[in-house]
Amino acid sequence: MICHLIGMLIIVNVRGFSMSPDLNPPIEPDESLAFNSPDEVAECWSGIDAGSELYAKLWSMTEFYDRSFSEEPDPEKNNTALFWDKFTYEQKVALNAAAKKRNEQWDLAVEWKEE
């Protein structure tokens, strides 16, 4: 019985299917990442430590910037969400956590100004 199941799994995998669940479910980027370039996230957001692997990865994304229209990065064409597929699962989790923290800080600042 076990040999039969193993044989079926091998056949399924050879044909391009997988019976095992994805250990890392897909993660969508926080919407605020669509308005900030990777270098801005690396330098200005709390939770991204200079010298960390994530910090270096964010800065490495600048090589993919489309500068055909301007020397300055344009968040519409060079935002962090556009490079989402280049980050590891762990980096995506860390980026979303940093975005959540930034959004909470932003909300507190807005509340403080309104009072």
Image: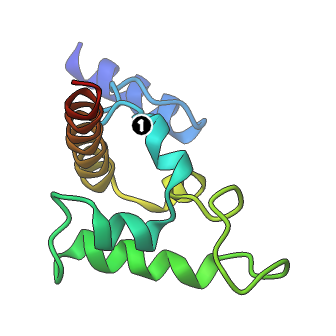
Q: Quadrant of residue 67?
A: bottom right
**Position of residue 28 in the picture relative to residue 15 (left or right):** left
Mark 1 — residue?
A: 30
Image x and y of residue 43, in percent: 30, 73
Q: Position of residue 79 (x, y in %)?
A: 57, 58
Q: Residue at x 71, y 61 (%)?
A: 77
Amino acid beneath label 1: Asp
In the depicted structure, whether residue 47 falls above or below residue 55 = above
Picture coordinates of residue 74, whole percent (x, y):
67, 67
Label 1: which secondary element: loop
Vertically, is 64 above or below 28?
below
Name which residue lies at 58% across and 85% down: 63
Q: At x 65% / y 76%, what residue is drawn?
A: 65
Which quadrant of the rendered structure holds the C terminus? top left
Looking at this view, name the residue that lies furthest to the front. Answer: 115
- In this rendering, position of residue 7 left or right of residue 3: right
Q: Residue at x 24, y 27 (%)?
A: 111
